[in-house]
Amino acid sequence: MKVVGFAGYSGSGKTTLVEKLIPALTARGLRVSVVKHAHHNFDVDQPGKDTFRHRQAGAFEVVVASSKRMALMREFEKPAQMTVHQLLAELYEGVDWVLVEGFKQSDLLKIEIWRAPTADYEGHPALYVDDDFIVAIATDAPEKLPVATQRPVLDLGNADAVADYLVSNGQRFEYSFDYRLAG
């Protein structure tokens, strides 16, 4: 499986790009999964549903499945921050690409989503300047990048071009992680 991260500040366009990349890659016959970092408390279940009631009753894990989908919900007994590698290990092995949104401090190869400075983005330094894991920049204003770079600069508004870049550089994104060597 191939794994690529998408790093950038809140509101930069990570979710929009990932949302557009999914059909661009699946149209090429590729199976795509997504790992998303969520902040704070979130819930994918609905009050009153059986699975919600099971979790509220104290189940550590609830798996719900139908002929169309499967979902696993796990309640942490105390706050836990899973690493991106632990989350990747939870995925189905028959996937071609995993798009990782968030985890900007991870040791995964990443594409930075960089927007030209506006009132919303003032004070946010470009990540690629200090992060060797950023292999490309997707931007709406390449001429305004704060520091010249030899990394590929991709059009943030053209998901097909980003998909072309990923597919043509696929070998670079092959994922392997040896848990025996991890601390």
Image (cartoon, rainbow, N blue to C red):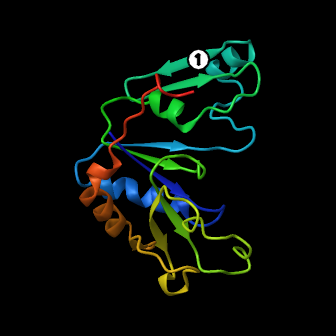
Q: Say whether residue 35 is left or right of residue 57.
A: left
Seen from the viewer's position, the closer of residues 155 and 74 is 155
Where residue 144 appears, x then y in whole percent?
55, 85
Image quarter of residue 38 = top right
Give the residue at x 50% y 80%: 148
Q: Say whether residue 11 is left or right of residue 78.
A: left
Furthest toward the bottom, the residue is 143
Image quarter of residue 76 = top right
Confirm whether residue 26 shows in the render: no
Where residue 108 appears, x then y in whole percent?
48, 47
Where residue 166 appears, x then y in whole percent?
32, 58
Assign the N terminus to one quadrant of the image: top left
- What element does badge 1 sit on? strand
Local crowd size for mark 1, using a 10 Å CA cut-off: few (<14), some (14–19), many (≥20)? some
Give the residue at x 38% y 71%: 152
Identify which amino acid the numbered label 1 is placed on: Val
Assign the C terminus to one quadrant of the image: top right
Q: Say whether residue 43 is left or right of residue 83.
A: right
Would you name the residue on which mark 1 appears? 62
Give the residue at x 32% y 37%: 95
Q: Is residue 98 above or below residue 62?
A: below
